[in-house]
C-alpha cells in the first residue's frame, strides 16, 4: 500500500485545513520482562484464581501506527483508521 507523504487535513490547533506530513512510529525498546510476564507476576501476588492461558495465534500483519504532523504549528495528530498491510510505503506526490 502506498500513502502520499503530505495530506491536507484538519488541524484542531490551527482550526482549519493545513498540509500534514505523514510519519510512522518506530518501535520502542523492549523491557526486561514482557507485558504478559509482568501481568502474570502481578496476578500471582494477590488473591484470585490461577490465570488462564492466553489464546494462541498471531495476526498475519501488524497495524501501521501513523502520525500526522501539521506543517503550520508542528503538532502531531492521529487518525482513527489504521491499516493492516504487508507492504507499506510513504510516497511523495508527483
Ligand atoms: Zn496546525
Image: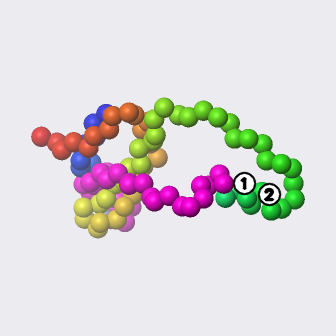
Q: Which residue is mark 2?
A: 44
The residue at 59%/55% (across/down) is 34
In the rendered image, the quadrant that contains the C terminus is: top left
Horizontal and vertical percent for residue 66?
Answer: 38, 49
Disc 2 beta carbon < 8 A from ligand 1?
no
Q: Is residue 45 left or right of residue 90?
A: right
- Front-lying residue, 19 or 5: 5
Which numbered marker is on residue 48? none
Question: Magenta stretch containing residue 25, yes or no?
Answer: yes
Taking the spot 48% from the left edge, 32% from the top edge, the residue there is 60
For the residues labelled 1 and 2, the Cα–Cα distance comes to 6 Å
From where the camera sits, is residue 17 visible? no
Instruction: Give the quadrant of the N terminus.
Output: top left
> Where residue 52 sits: x, y (%)?
78, 42
Marks 1/2 in contact by CB < 8 Å: the verdict is: yes
Q: Quadrant of ligand 1?
A: bottom left
**Which residue matches tag 1?**
40
Query: In this rendering, is residue 85 above or below 20?
Result: above
Where residue 91 sits, quadrant-wise, is top left
> Can residue 30 be seen in this snapshot?
yes
Judged from this view, the residue extending furthest toward the left is 94
In reply to whether residue 75 is colored magenta, the answer given is no
In this view of the protein, which residue sits in the foreground, 94 or 64?
A: 64
Q: Is residue 32 above or below residue 36?
A: below
Neighbour class for label 1 at 10 Å: few (<14), some, many (≥20)?
A: few
Instruction: Give coordinates of residue 10: x percent, y percent.
Output: 34, 54
Residue bounds of the magenta highlight: 8-37
Amino acid at each position: 500500500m502506498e500513502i502520499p507523504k503530505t495530506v491536507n487535513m484538519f488541524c484542531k490547533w490551527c482550526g482549519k485545513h493545513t498540509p500534514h506530513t505523514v510519519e510512522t512510529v518506530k518501535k520502542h525498546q523492549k523491557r526486561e520482562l514482557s507485558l504478559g510476564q509482568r501481568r502474570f507476576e502481578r496476578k500471582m501476588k494477590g488473591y484470585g484464581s490461577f490465570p488462564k492461558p492466553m489464546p494462541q495465534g498471531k495476526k498475519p500483519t501488524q497495524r501501521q501506527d501513523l502520525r500526522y504532523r501539521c506543517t503550520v504549528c508542528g503538532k502531531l495528530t492521529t487518525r482513527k483508521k489504521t491499516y493492516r498491510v504487508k507492504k507499506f510505503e510513504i510516497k511523495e506526490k508527483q
